[in-house]
Amino acid sequence: MTMFWILSSTALFLCAAWLAYPFLRRTEIERDETDAALSIYRDQADEIRRDLEADLISKQEFDAAQREIEARALKAARHSVGGMSVTRRSPLTAGVVVATLIVGSAAGYAWLGTAGAGDRPLAARKTEALVQKAQAGDIGSRIELLVETVQKHPDSFEDWWLLARSYAATGDNASAADAYRRAAELSGNDPGVLSAYAEAMTLANGNKVPQAARILFQQIRAETGDPRARYYLALAKAQAQDFDGALQDWAALAAESDPNAPWMPLVRRDIVNMARFTERDVSEYLPDASRAELNKAAGKQTDADQFALLRRADTLDKQLENDPSDYKGWQELAGIRAALGDTQKAKAALEAARDRFAAAPFILSKLDATAADLGLDLVPSSSTTNGPSQEDIAAAQEMSAEDQARMIEGMVAGLAAKLDDNPDNPDGWVMLVRSYSHLGETGKAADAMARASAHYSDNPEILAKIRENVASLEQ
């Protein structure tokens, strides 16, 4: 605090001295600039006269130069402001300036300042700003505060729990899973916390129940019969193609739950969808099924459903026209066309996609699977997942530049799809980033590098090698 007053007083004294100095200088007499200009013109007039006498210039040149000098001298004389100026000392004015500065500064600080406050480091001021934003409802600021809090108090269950719930609210399920894991450890593996942890793992995995989450859900169900654990265990059965088991488990959960329970809309939706997929009578699993649920399970669509599907199909048509490299978009479009009963357009969408990705065997296998799921009578593609054959390479050499570019884009899209399915492939990530860069797709290259960084965030050695191999592309 003492240092603050020393620095403040010094700054105030210097400001006061700087403002008072002009009024304390000795009396000075300053000549007007016009006098100096006229003196120069007189010297110039004398100089050209000497040049004339020495025959250095002609009489005509002398007359012209003299007229020019006289004109300039006359113009300067018209702008004269009086010849000389006098600057006198004014100690009284200097004293008034200094007093005003000191009194005004002291009064302003007394009104706005906080004399008793201690030093406030930058970190403290940053934290205060975050607190204000968090109190205003900014969840991002709330998360930053909680991250700082758990770093200071790593053994606080409440702080880790709040951080995990905040991450989940923003849809960052991977970060939420990490925070829930730490909260579960601090809670002594409380079933409720473990259940939230397993759910976050599932959501971070694209809503596919991973093995670790399934084990946790089985443990929780055995201990408490937690509805969330029961739901996800049934979902795991459905994903393992045990459709009857999933239907039976969801039906049992629906029968034993309060009709107004928050999880019931999700359970009923999945029962209806599974009954439709397996062509079962939904009333066997939902005795109180509504007319809309019965129609949906029977494959009947309301006008609103059809309108929504048509709008989505139109949106996909436009998106794929601008970016035909989105094979998942082609799959979705085929599915929507099939759901609307237009099998010809569904087949056309898949055929267009297969033509686009003719050089990407992995994507072709996905498209064939989609055709089989939709019951479309498309002949399976003959490509394999082993890459292009010698015949394919020879044929490619005879293609036009445009067709070759399409083939290359298809191969790159196939590599991206394989990495989506199995991201544990460092060489594949390097190849994908390099491929996008060579194609001029800098945005996609950056996105691929970001996905690789996220996947290998726990393995800095592999991540460093990937970055080293693509570093030359940034130069």
Image: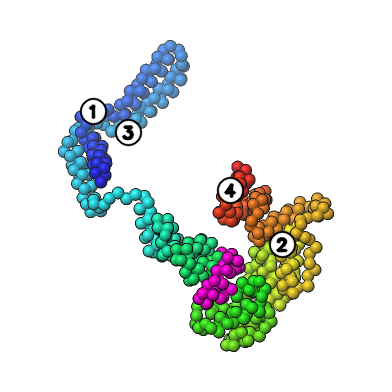
Q: Is residue 160 above or below residue 347?
A: above
Secondary structure category for the residue under label 2: helix
**From the viewer's perspective, is 362 left or right of 149?**
right
The picture quadrant where one finds residue 59 is top left
Secondary structure under tag 3 reads: loop
* Mark 4 neighbour density, 10 Å: few (under 14) some (14–19) many (20 or more): few
Tell me where residue 192 appears, x and y as whole percent: 48, 71
Q: Which residues are magenta?
A: 204-233
Residue pointed to by mark 2? 363
Alpha carbon distance from label 3 to label 4 = 79 Å
- Judged left or right of residue 5, residue 373 is right
Q: Could you say where residue 54 lies in the image, as x and y percent from the top left?
A: 43, 11
Disc number at residue 443?
Answer: none
Q: Nearer the viewer, mark 1 or mark 2?
A: 2
Residues 368 and 109: in front is 368
- Disc number at residue 461? 4
- Distance from the alpha carbon under mark 4 to that under mark 1: 78 Å
| Residue 80 point in image, percent of width and height | 30, 32
- Location of mark 1 (residue): 29
Neighbour tally class for label 2: few under 14, some 14-19, many 20 plus, Cα within 10 Å: many
Which amino acid type is marked by label 1? Answer: Ile
